[in-house]
Structures are given as structure tokens and as C-alpha cells.
Image (spheres, rainbow, N blue to C red):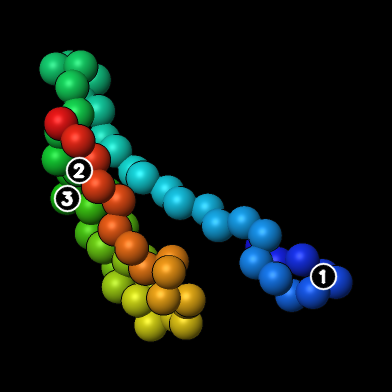
Amino acid sequence: MYRESSEERAAIMELMLTHVDQVARRGSSWPVSIRQPLEAIAEARVALKTDEDVRHKLKIRH
């Protein structure tokens, strides 16, 4: 999101998608039927231009 008056960046949105197995009630790997479309979206996203400071990876502590 950019400020209309100055074109200065005003906000960035980050998404973290997780899958929860409803039987085990824990986080788990995505089913292939969902993972493949998500991977295709991620690959297509790489080709889009973004500022360098937006390309950092989230670090999650366990």
C-alpha cells in the first residue's frame, strides 16, 4: 500500500499459511491437492517485481 500524495510505502502484508490436521489437532503437511496449487502461486509470485526489503523470510522459533 502506498500513500497517494507521496508514493511512499505505507504498509506491507505478510501471509503465513498453515495446515492443521483436524483429527490429530496439530499442524501438519499440506495435502498434495492443496500444496501443488500453493506452490504454483508461489512460483508465479517470484517473477513479480518487489522491493528488496520485502523479500526477507519469516523466522519462527519453536
Q: Residue 44: x percent and y percent?
A: 36, 75
Where does label 3 land, which residue?
A: 32
Is residue 3 rendered to the left or right of residue 28? right
Q: State the SS at label 3.
A: helix
Q: Are marks 2 and 1 in contact (CB under 8 Å)?
A: no
Is residue 16 rendered to the left or right of residue 62? right
Where does label 1 land, which residue?
A: 4
Name the front one of labels 2 and 3. 2
Measure how far apart labels 2 and 1 are at the Cα level. Answer: 39 Å
Depth check: 16 or 31 in front? 16
Residue 9, picture quadrant: bottom right
Q: Residue 4: x percent and y percent?
A: 82, 70
Residue at x 29% of width, y 58% of height: 57
**Quadrant where the C terminus is found in the figure:** top left
Q: For residue 17, which numbered disc appears in the image?
A: none
Name the front one of labels 1 and 3. 1
Name the front one of labels 2 and 1. 1
Residues packed near mark 2 inside 10 Å, few (<14), some (14 to 19) or many (20 plus) = some
Where does label 2 land, which residue?
A: 30
Depth check: 10 or 44 in front? 10
Q: Earlier in the sequence, mark 1 or mark 3?
A: 1
Q: Are marks 2 and 3 in contact (CB under 8 Å)?
A: yes
Q: Amino acid at mark 3?
A: Val
Residue 22, picture quadrant: top left
Is residue 43 rendered to the left or right of residue 45? left
Residues packed near mark 1 inside 10 Å, few (<14), some (14 to 19) or many (20 plus) = few
